[in-house]
Image: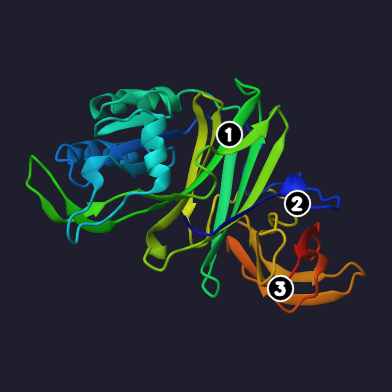
Amino acid sequence: MMNKFHLSLATALLIPLSFEAQTLVTTEPQGRTCLLEVFTAINCGNCPAAHTVANGLAADHPDDLVLVEVHGGSLSVPQGAQPDFRTDDGAALWSSWGVTFQPQGLVNRSQLSSANSWPSSVPVVLSASSPVNVGLASAYDAGSQQLSIMVEAYYTGTSLTSTDQLYVLLTEDHVVGYQQDYVNGAHAAYDHRHALRDYVTSVEGEDITMPAAGEFVQHSYTYTVPSTWSLEELHVVAFVQADQGPVYQVKRVAAMDGSTAINESSAGGGLGSAYPVPAAEQVFVPMAADHIGGVLTVTDVQGRTVLSFSVPAGSTLLTIPVADLADGVYAYGLAGADRRLMVVRH
C-alpha cells in the first residue's frame, strides 16, 4: 500500500473559510457520466475482445465514460517477465462483487455483465440525470514524488440515499506487456489500458452524509507515487455513488497538472481553492482556462504582500512556492478580484 494522506476541508480548517465559488465543478445540473470497470487478467485469452469493446465505447464517449481495468483472479498471476497488475484493492473488488471469472464488467456498478451488453447499457446511463456534479484537479511535486489531489462535489438535487460515497483512485494507461489472446495468439507487447494501480481513498470510499441540494463537498489528498509508474500515463479518477446504488458522476484527469477547471467569474478572477490544506512546500490553485492572467499577490494576515508574480493567461493550474513562508493563513488573488485563503504549516 502506497503512502496516502487525506484531509476533508470541512473539518481540517479551524478558521472560517468561504468556498462557495468553486472552480472545479459547475453548479448547473448535469447528466450522469459512466464508469465501466472491467474485470480482466493477463492470462485470460477471452479478455482482449472485451477490451476492444470497452475501448471502443471510451472512444465514442470521450468526455462521458471512464474505464478502469481491474486485474485479478488466478489468471492474473504473472509468470517470468509478465507484468503484475494485481492490487489489494482490486482483489477486494473481485471479492465484494463476487467475480469468479473474466472478462466481466460493471456499468456504473449496477450488476456484473458481459461485454456484449455494454454498448446498450452505456447510453441508458448517459441519458439519466445526476443529483451531484464532480470535479477534480491533480498536481505532482517531483521533489517529494507526491501527488496533490483536490476533489469537489456539488449537489444540484437530492440523492437516492441518505449517504453517498466518494471514491478516488489511480489508473495507468499504455502499459506494455504480455497478454494471452485465444483469437489472435498471445501478445508479448500488448497495450494494457486504464489499469487500476491503487485507491487513494479506501476501497469502501469516503461517506458523504445527508447530501442535499446546494451542498458543496471538498476533499484534499496526497499520494506518494512509486518510481516504477509512468507519470505521463497516470490518471486520477473520482466518482460519487449512492450507497449500495448507482454511480452518479465520474471524472478523470491527468495526474500531472490535470484539472476539470471551469469558468467562475466570481471566484477570484478564475482562481480556485488552494490545495493541499495545509501546505508545506507548494500550493496548487486550479484556474479557469479562459482567465485573462495578471499579477497574483499573496498577503499575510496583516495585509503585507509576501509573494508577487505574473500569471500567464490561459494556464489551468498555478503553483505557488510556500516553503519559505511562516506557518499561518494567507490570502491570494489577482489584482482587482476577490481573494481566497490558503494555509501553510511546516
Q: Which callout, 2 or 3, points to the residue nearer the camera?
A: 2
Marks 1 & 3, CB-CB < 8 Å contact: no
Residue at x 76% of width, y 44% of height = 20
Q: Position of residue 39 (x, y in %)?
A: 31, 37
Q: Residue furthest top?
A: 160
- Which comes before the other along the chain, label 1 or label 3? 1
What quarter of the picture does the C terminus occupy?
A: bottom right
What residue is shown at x 24% (from left), y 31% (from top)? 101
What type is the residue that disc 3 sits on? Val
Q: Which residue is mark 2?
A: 12
- Which is closer to the viewer, label 1 or label 3? 1
Three-letter residue code for mark 1: Gln
The reply to whether residue 76 is visible in this rendering is yes
Give the structural element (helix, strand or loop) at label 2: helix
- At a point 55% along the width and 71% down the height, the residue shown is 144
Reading the image, the residue beneath label 3 is 322
Q: CA distance from mark 2 to mark 3?
A: 19 Å
Q: Is residue 18 above or below residue 142?
A: above
Task: State left or right for residue 22 relative to residue 315.
Answer: right
Coloration of the structure image: rainbow
Q: Position of residue 253 (x, y in %)?
A: 48, 52
Corner quadrant of residue 295: bottom right
Label 2 is placed on what type of residue?
Ala
Residue projecting furthest to the right: 302
Give the number of the disc on residue 165: 1
